[in-house]
Image (cartoon, rainbow, N blue to C red):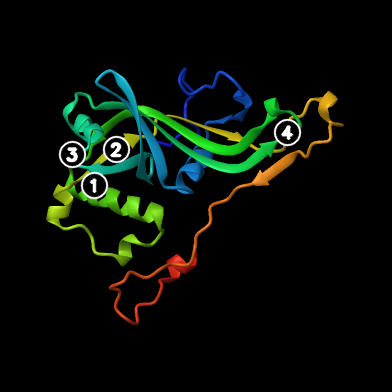
Amino acid sequence: MSVTPVDYEPTERTVPSRSRQRARYDRETVHSILDQTYLCHLGFVRDGAPVVLPTLYGRVGETLYVHGSTGSRPLLAAGRQDPGLPVCLTVTHVDGLVLAKSAFHHSINYRSVVVHGTAYQVTDEAECRTALDALVNNVVPGRAADSRPANAKELAATAVIRLDLNEVSAKIRTGGPNDDPEDLDLPFWSGVVPVAPAYGTPVPAAGLAPGIAVPDYLSAL
């Protein structure tokens, strides 16, 4: 019986050149960071120049699915290039603003994941539907089952690429400012300003039929 490794193997691209003590390679940490947000930045090379696009993603096991249009250049490249499209995908949470006595030591508390690999376009309809459900549920858990699934026309207009989690690292900073001892008596405030996402009250669509209540999964946000 095969056993899934607990850690991702560090590589030359996933070992940071600075603050190596902040790097993490365990699956629990990586999955936790990925599953607590839904926006990523997808980097690739187009016509010899670097391009970075913000887009939605969802995770299913050891695979990330990235959503786009069938006319999207990176998605077209992932489908046409052999053996796929080399990419770098990043996800970042900002947890706090770290204000030090000196400008030099200002920082942020954060959690991030960087994934290197080759992206491929999903062509199997069943996998595509699984990927789209994961994308929707990653934004609002429970929403995929509470909405109409894509029909054949919509599937034809939608493209999804997959990126396996093989070459992966997380990086985390926590704690307060690292003030120099000689700066501690300076008359400036120092500390951490926490940062957290906030959801407002759901606003119903103009054409929503009377009597349709806000779902519990939205109230839970």
Tell me if residue 181 comes above or below residue 209 in the rendering: above
User: Is there any visible trace of residue 19 in the rendered image?
Assistant: yes
Query: Label 3, label 1: how many angstroms apart (C-alpha)?
Result: 20 Å
Q: Is residue 138 left or right of residue 151?
A: right
The residue under label 4 is: 100
First in residue order: circle 4 vs circle 3 = 3
- What is the secondary structure assignment of the residue under circle 4? loop
Tell me if residue 181 comes above or below residue 28 in the rendering: above
The residue under label 2 is: 162
Residue type indicated by callout 2: Arg
The residue under label 3 is: 71
Residue 97: give x, y in percent of width and height.
64, 40
Disc 2 or disc 3, which is closer to the eye? 3
Residue 216: give x, y in percent of width and height.
44, 71
Disc 4 or disc 3, which is closer to the eye? 4
Disc 3 or disc 1, which is closer to the eye? 3
Residue type indicated by callout 4: Ala
Assess disc 3: are there few (<14), some (14-19) or many (≥20) residues with their C-alpha within 10 Å of its C-alpha. few
Residue under the point 36% across and 44% down: 57
Q: Which mark is residue 218?
A: none
Q: Nearer the viewer, residue 78 or 188?
A: 188
Query: Label 2, label 4: how many angstroms apart (C-alpha)?
Result: 41 Å
Disc 2 or disc 4, which is closer to the eye? 4
First in residue order: circle 2 vs circle 1 = 1
